[in-house]
Amino acid sequence: MVWLRTWIVLLALTAPALAVQPDEVLTDARLETRARALSQELRCMVCQNQSIDDSDAPLARDLRILVRERLVAGNTDREVLDFLVERYGDFVLLKPPFNMRTALLWLLPPALVGLGLAILLVGAYRHRRPVAGAGALTAEERARLEKIINN
Amino acid sequence: MIAELGHYALVLALALALIQASVPMVGARLDDGILMGVAGPTALAQFAFVGVAFAALTACYVMSDFSVVNVFENSHSLKPLLYKVTGVWGNHEGSMLLWVLILAGFGALVAIFSGNLPEKLRANVLGVQAWIAAAFYLFILITSNPFLRLPDAPFEGRDLNPVLQDIGLAVHPPMLYLGYVGFSIAFAFAVAALIEGRIDAAWARWVRPWTLLAWIFLTLGIAMGSYWAYYELGWGGWWFWDPVENASLMPWLAGTALLHSALVMEKREALKVWTILLAILAFSLSLLGTFLVRSGVLTSVHTFASDPTRGVFILAILVFFIGGALALFAWRAPLLKKGGLFAPISREGALIVNNLFLVSTCATVFVGTLYPLALEALTGAKISVGAPFFNATFGPLFLVLLVAVPFGPLLAWKRGDLVGAAQRLTGAFVIALTGIAVTFAAEGGGPLLPPLGIGLGAFVIAGALTDLAERTAVFKAAPRVALARAVGLPRSAWGSVLAHLGLGVLLLGVIGETQWSAEKIAAMKPGETVTIRRYAVRFDGATTRQEANYRELVTQFTVRHNGEVIDTLQASKRTFPARASSTTEAALMSRGASQLYLSLGDVNPDGSVTVRIYHKPLVLLIWLAAVVMAAGGALSLSDRRLRVGAPKPAKRRASLQPAE
């Protein structure tokens, strides 16, 4: 077991621990599943873009244990998140809440799709109209045609 | 001496780039053939000189010349030769040198393969390429010179970051850069077209192969990076929505949109302005990616080697090229003539919908990546935008896009028949519904996402095959006729079938991995067994091993399935004394497309080892899908029509025929 001792010394100095440790895991499987799901929503605040579920940092471990303590105490998921936000601010949430500060962030993707679709639909409507009144040209079209011919 | 040679070669490359950036473009303006003719030879010479610079730095690494700062900081005399070579681009300065090498390489390729291009377009394209090259040579020479010397040469180097000492470093960055930088050609073509104020279907045909080439490399590069993170980081994730990953995803999305819109332009002369804009955007996003990674503006798990002081310089490059190109676009784009008309329900319409969703997903990634930075800079408020945000926004948009994918290829150009397309997809609908029902039954109820996801994946795959069946008439004609039609099908048609099929495969893999993975975390002592799904994993014991530049703890596991030994696994942990850091080497066992994944954590004081075991169903499909898509791209690239280039007078084409 000499290798083991040298390794413990070596690893203690350098090795990153795995994220969730065996001693953290709750015996109640349902609570543990909820804890894991919550952990993935929470940021390890000393890391770069890592959830506390993925992180090796001691702070992440503290937060994981805290989340589990609250769950065991009977808190709902919402209450656990609220508790952490109160303590650490919105920064702790990997999915920012919708408010004045994040409105643009949340609304831009659906707005873009909506705007794009609106433009396409208007274009389609404009395209269809002359087909409906087949034959005769509108004044606008006649002007365009004239322009094209004169070019 | 070698380092100084490399430095000098780089300075000469800059000088050549400046000539290439000015003389041919002036020539194009004055309609002077001799001045325009300067572009080709200078592009080749420029590539040769950057090649010399790159070879010089590589030589310094191979010889472990620690008097060069860059080698001292990133290499070690005992490192295996492969990692000495890959270490060249495992750091900021070297990776920028690789970047310009690839840029110059693409410039040289354009110079070689642009014989059929109009003289002015060629001169302008190579000129714009050279502007980009010159900016980055200046960046390297002024802020990131890899050839600097130390006054007193140390005896040993500081070694490369252990995470990077992996075959992944040999493949991932070069692939990714080939993709990023490849889009510079589409960009150069777009800017050249704007300068001339003329653009037509032939333009799209010239741009498409280059875009396709870049897209293939970017696809493979992203997939390779994902697989590397999966097996190296030790927690089994394959996509983290990390800003650096997003930086590579954005050009991919824009590039994919560009490939599709260039198709419309090539076939129907429509969407010209939009295609030009996409060509500018794809490379702008590549530049943005380079800026995000290289400036250290977001220090992330990926940013092992960056320096914030350089940020301003790259930002200036970014502003100059993106701002310049967009200004030129705003000024000249109205001059471009509108192309062919088409009904909303048509192939063109479908490709516009494709573009709408690809650009929207790209914008989602863009906003999600940069919003926290902007908000903090403007208001000081700190928020986090991570995986849950992207899953909630990017996810639905992309799923809608996937629903539309099978319809597109079945619609005719100009005026399509949506009901007819839906009728032809009947088989695909049946397969999709079967997939949903079977998955739902197997799950015994539960959440709806997995059955719907599997159904959608099956629909996309079946839809791609329907397209193929329609084109070959496999269900209508005699088998021999169908086979003849399959052989006669243009390779680009096979390419699009494969690429679309790959999307379906990707979705199956993503659903399998995210919805059905199982995980066990345990502290195991030798002789103990952990059961996960139907696999029993026994910890047999551990040994240590001394390698040239690291020590390794190797653990042995036996995997049993229904009591029978089916495999043994070796997971290890390496400690690198030069950097006092360590890496985990996960053990992987593949069964079909699923994997058993085992990685080591701490060695505990009681002699047990913390072990994390995952069962990841269908996970391999994720990367297989990327390979299928890239293969589709390669097939499409090999299409005769792209090699022959733009349509030519019949006489000329006939004379080309025998050479085929």
Image (cartoon, coloured by chain):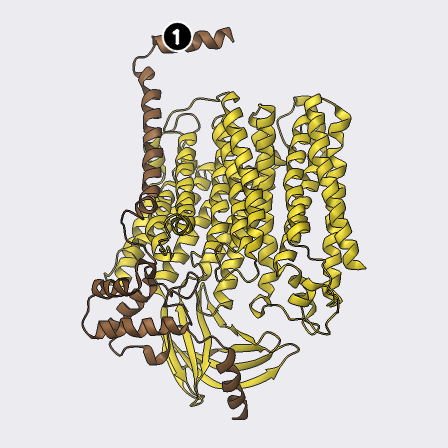
Chain colours: A brown, B yellow
Q: Quadrant of residue B79?
A: bottom right
User: Height in image: B199 above or below B49?
Assistant: above
Q: Which residue is drawn at 41% across and 74% down?
A: B613
Q: Residue at x 55, y 34 (%)?
A: B324
Q: Quadrant of the C terminus of chain B?
A: top right
User: x, y (%) of residue B611?
Assistant: 43, 78
Total numbered badges shown on the rendered structure: 1
Q: Mark 1 lies on which chain?
A: A
Q: In which quarter of the image is the N terminus of chain B?
A: bottom right
Give the camera-side residue of B136 and B84: B136
Give the camera-side residue of A122 and B92: B92
User: Height in image: B116 above or below B145?
Assistant: above
User: x, y (%) of residue A119?
Assistant: 35, 29
Q: Which residue is drawn at 50% across and 63% down?
A: B229
Task: Looking at this view, name the residue that lies furthest to the left.
Answer: A74
Q: In which quarter of the image is residue B591?
A: bottom left
Task: Looking at this view, name the residue that lies furthest to the bottom.
Answer: A1
Image position of B521 (left or right of B334): left
Q: Residue at x 27, y 49 (%)?
A: A99
User: x, y (%) of residue B522?
Assistant: 38, 80
Amino acid at circle 1: Arg
**Crowding near the residue tagged with mark 1, few <14, some 14–19, many ≥20 C-alpha atoms within 10 Å:** few
Q: Can residue B119 be seen in this view?
A: no
User: x, y (%) of residue B653?
Assistant: 67, 26
Q: Mark 1 points at which residue?
A: A142
Q: Is residue B324 visible?
A: yes
